[in-house]
Image (spheres, rainbow, N blue to C red):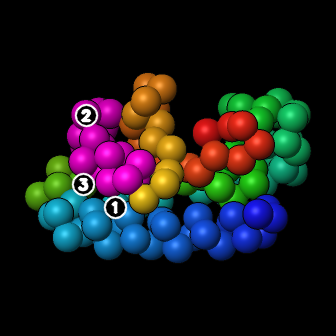
Amino acid sequence: MTLGQKQRKFTRMIADLICFAYSQGYELTLGDAYRDPRVHGHVGQKKSYSSANSLHKERLAVDFNLFKNGQYLTSTEDHRPLGEYWESIGGSWGGRFNDGNHYSIEHGGRK
């Protein structure tokens, strides 16, 4: 699968995740999505706070701010229902490596 095909698949999966979240009574706002290489460096380059090999740089990861009943939820456990759903549709959830609000798909061996 090409990078472009994977980006389009990821976008569709994110739409499904957002619909699932709202059906469960959650609300979301976007955190980090695309990390511009002019600010964060190209893939393989460490610049600013971003990881050198961040999937955000390739439009294959997004971080969500999670809310329920108007309350901002910050813990990895708060994201678990969404993370487990995300994994069930083929995604990689950051809660498995202590980054609960991170949702990505594998690319080049990176999650």
Residue position for label 3: 67
- Does 19 sit above or below residue 29? below
- Judged left or right of residue 47, residue 99 is left
The quadrant holding residue 46 is top right
The quadrant of the rendering that contains the N terminus is bottom right
Part of the protein shown in magenta: 72-88
Q: CA distance from mark 3 to mark 1?
A: 6 Å
Question: Which amino acid lies under the numbered mark 3 shown in the image of this protein?
Answer: Phe
Question: Which amino acid lies under the numbered mark 1 shown in the image of this protein?
Answer: Leu
**Crowd rating for badge 3 (residues with CA inside 10 Å; few <14, some 14–19, many 20+):** some
- Does 52 sit above or below residue 102? above
- Judged left or right of residue 60, residue 38 is right
Q: Could you say which is closer to the camera, residue 33 or residue 83?
A: 83
Q: Earlier in the sequence, mark 3 or mark 1?
A: 1
Q: CA distance from mark 3 to mark 2?
A: 13 Å
Report if the CB atoms under discs 3 and 1 are less than 8 Å apart: yes
Is 52 one of the magenta-colored residues?
Answer: no
**Percent coordinates x, y for residue 11 in the rendering:** 57, 70
The quadrant holding residue 109 is top right
Instruction: Give residue 28's mark.
Output: 1
**Percent coordinates x, y for residue 16 in the rendering:** 40, 71
Residue 31 is at least partly visible in this image: no
**Percent coordinates x, y for residue 70 in the rendering:** 16, 58
What secondary structure is the magenta-colored segment mainly? helix
Is 87 one of the magenta-colored residues?
Answer: yes
Q: Earlier in the sequence, mark 3 or mark 2?
A: 3
Question: Which amino acid lies under the numbered mark 2 shown in the image of this protein?
Answer: Glu
Residue 81 is at least partly visible in this image: yes
